[in-house]
């Protein structure tokens, strides 16, 4: 069965948002005696959703402040969501070149924030579905968001491919039974993508890779 749906991760795959996430985290944690995090430190932490990132940053001794820190983050981030966020080179051209496929975003960022980023960067028009961390009962690496997307389009696992920059994306795709493609230019080291079916170094490679997926190879 041919591939009909391409599912993308958002942060680290379609857009480089790490500076705005870092600034928002540092704003949120500032009043609690924590040293500011660097972009590199935050890049190593993101992926599981902002609440989990904040838990890891503030530590057990400050967990009682978790909700207020999360709220501070969301308030600041919503106002500065694309100050320093931009699509990776070749993303728009690649999405335009995939006009024969259904396309979805599955992010561990909340759905409203994911949509806000996509709209602000003129990417939302390319997608038929946006799934956020709060759209389904579980988030990546659970297969549930991927299965939700398949169900939305009435497709089977053999009709879809998952594209992402982290082990969470690959694990979610694998668990759902879809082909997986890791991109190396995002937030995670290449070794995190070792379980992917394919690895590409540039999003523009995706167009030609998709052409190799025939009807009898999977």
Image (cartoon, grey):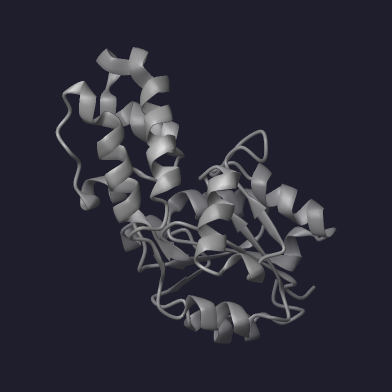
Count of marks overlaid on the render: 0
Q: In this view, does 82 lie to the left or right of 179?
A: left
Which corner quadrant holds the C terminus? bottom right
**Which residue is at 69% across, 81% downward?**
99
Query: Where is residue 145 shown, x and y percent of the image?
Result: 66, 46
For the N terminus, the quadrant is bottom right
Q: Can the viewer see residue 58?
A: yes
Depth check, front residue: 46 or 212? 46
Q: In which quarter of the image is residue 177?
A: bottom right
Q: Where is residue 144 drawn, in percent x and y?
A: 67, 42
- Residue 204 drawn at (x, y percent): 48, 82
Q: Is residue 212 visible?
A: no
In the image, is 144 to the left or to the right of 28?
A: right
Which residue is drawn at the image coordinates 61% and 65% (left, top)? 124
Residue at left 51%, top 45%? 109
Along the line of sight, the residue nearer the viewer: 38 or 73: 73
Q: Which residue lies furthest to the front in this view?
A: 79
């Amino acid at each position: 069965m041919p591939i009909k749906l391409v599912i993308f991760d958002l942060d680290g795959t379609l857009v480089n948002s790490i500076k705005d996430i870092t600034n928002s985290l540092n704003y949120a944690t500032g009043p609690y005696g924590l040293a500011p995090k660097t972009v590199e430190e935050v890049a190593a932490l993101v992926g599981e959703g902002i609440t989990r990132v904040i838990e890891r940053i503030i530590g057990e001794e400050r967990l009682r402040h978790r909700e207020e820190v999360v709220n501070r983050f969301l308030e600041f981030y919503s106002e500065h969501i694309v100050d320093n966020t931009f699509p990776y080179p070749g993303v728009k051209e690649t999405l335009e070149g995939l006009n024969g496929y259904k396309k979805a975003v599955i992010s561990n960022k909340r759905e409203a924030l994911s949509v806000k980023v996509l709209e602000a960067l003129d990417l939302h028009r390319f997608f038929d579905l946006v799934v956020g961390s709060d759209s389904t009962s579980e988030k990546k690496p659970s297969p549930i968001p991927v299965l939700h997307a398949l169900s939305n389009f009435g497709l089977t696992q053999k009709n879809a491919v998952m594209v992402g920059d982290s082990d969470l994306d690959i694990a979610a795709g694998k668990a759902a039974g879809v082909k997986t493609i890791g991109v190396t230019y995002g937030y995670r080291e290449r070794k995190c993508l070792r379980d992917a079916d394919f690895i590409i170094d540039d999003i523009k490679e995706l167009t030609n890779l998709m052409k190799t997926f025939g009807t009898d190879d999977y």
